Image: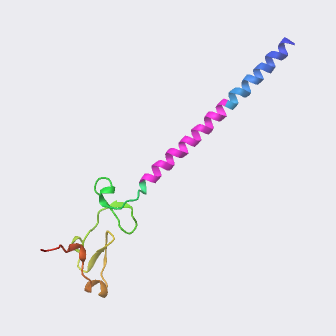
Amino acid sequence: MNGIQEVGSSSLLGSTNEAYIMKLFLKLVVLTGIFIFSCSSNNSETCKVDYDCEGTLICNQVTHKCEPFVCKTNTDCVETGLICISNKCVPATISDKDAVDTTDLTLQQ
């Protein structure tokens, strides 16, 4: 009878260890998931103005995402025939060429 108790207590101890290890593993999986989600959400950080972005990144006013600077005004696009739209130098169409670039204008008193 004494041998049965040892086997029973050993088995009980073993299942307790397995349950502990399983709980620990599940906690580790959940914490890893939270960490990965929080890291990936920083890459797609939303912004409203350039100051919301880190370093030399600027805020794209169309996508509201921080991205490397390409252009802010048409004069930043060095190739002929390109205009700046949403931080990208794109070919100007006939209607775009007639439009006034209001970002270069300043109020005069």
Residue farthest along the top direction in this orientation? 2
Q: Tell me where the magenta segment starts and ends, as one range.
A: 20-42
- Placement of 72 over or under 17, stated as above or below: below
What is the number of callouts on the image? 0
Q: Quadrant of the C terminus?
A: bottom left
- Placement of 9 over or under 85, stated as above or below: above
Q: Where is residue 107, by image quadrant?
A: bottom left
Residue 86 in percent (x, y) is at 33, 71
Residue name at image x 58 percent, y 42 percent: 30
Residue name at image x 24 percent, y 71 percent: 73
Residue farthest along the front direction in this orientation? 109
Q: Is residue 100 left or right of residue 46?
A: left
Magenta stretch, main secondary structure, is helix
- Placement of 67 over or under 11, stated as above or below: below
Q: Quadrant of the N terminus?
A: top right
* Along the line of sight, the residue nearer the viewer: 99 or 4: 99
Residue 92 in percent (x, y) is at 30, 81
